[in-house]
Image (cartoon, coloured by chain):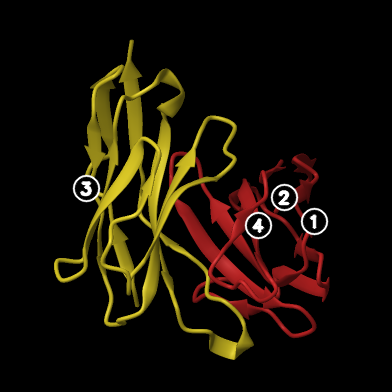
Chain colours: A red, B yellow
Amino acid sequence: GAVVSQHPSWVICKSGTSVKIECRSLDFQATTMFWYRQFPKQSLMLMATSNEGSKATYEQGVEKDKFLINHASLTLSTLTVTSAHPEDSSFYICSASPAGISSWQYFGPGTRLTVT
Amino acid sequence: AQTVTQSQPEMSVQEAETVTLSCTYDTSESDYYLFWYKQPPSRQMILVIRQEAYKQQNATENRFSVNFQKAAKSFSLKISDSQLGDAAMYFCAYRSARRSGGGADGLTFGKGTHLIIQP
């Protein structure tokens, strides 16, 4: 149980375009979902926290107009990178906390974004 | 803000031996959670072990155990009988136990330790 999926697993887009990444909790309802970014050979950095039905909370230094997060249902959160640039190329990982068990987080497999 | 420090960028251990990975953290909170995650080359984050700060007893999961020293803000991971499959990046992580805005808090990660297992 407690499986989180991400789609796509790898995406290449051209500079200036937008790309959407989906994060789904497959067998549980997620009150809260998180988005992390991991640059090569570095650690995970929390980008934003989204609670179902409300606006996402962004970490300091993360542009909310560039990284649009939507958590419209208890099983789906999306991250849209708008007007992508090569410096946005990274590994994006989502995690989800089950409703009522906020101390646990389950991670998705990640999405590799390459902006050319 | 909380910080997590892993001072060992890389560790190497012989197969079947024991290795300890270090982690220290800084927080002004009294209630929180600490985690060790494993990230193999696939990059899937795998939870190794979890510790609740209010529990004095050190968490154990089979060959994995922690030495949690709350006063010293130290949370080391001991891997016994190391196996080739243990080779990976290991991240120490912190999470507040408070629930802000009605939801959970995200994790703060250390920079990681690359564990190499020598056959």
B117 shown above or below B39:
above
| Distance from Cα at disc 2 to Cα at disc 1 | 6 Å
Give the percent coordinates (x, y) of residue B77. 29, 45
Mark 2–mark 1 CB contact (< 8 Å) = yes
Whether residue A42 is visible, yes or no, is yes
| Distance from Cα at disc 3 to Cα at disc 4 | 26 Å
Chain on which label 4 sits:
A
Q: Which mark is residue A27?
A: 1
| Distance from Cα at disc 2 to Cα at disc 3 | 34 Å
Tell me the mark number nearer the camera, choosing from 2 and 3.
2
Question: Taking A59 as reference, is A111 left or right?
Answer: right
Packing grade of label 4 (10 A; few <14, some 14-19, many >=20) is many
- Between A70 and B76, the one lying in front of the other is B76
Callouts 4 and 2 in the same chain: yes
A2 shown above or below A33:
above
Chain on which label 3 sits:
B
Mark 2–mark 3 CB contact (< 8 Å) = no
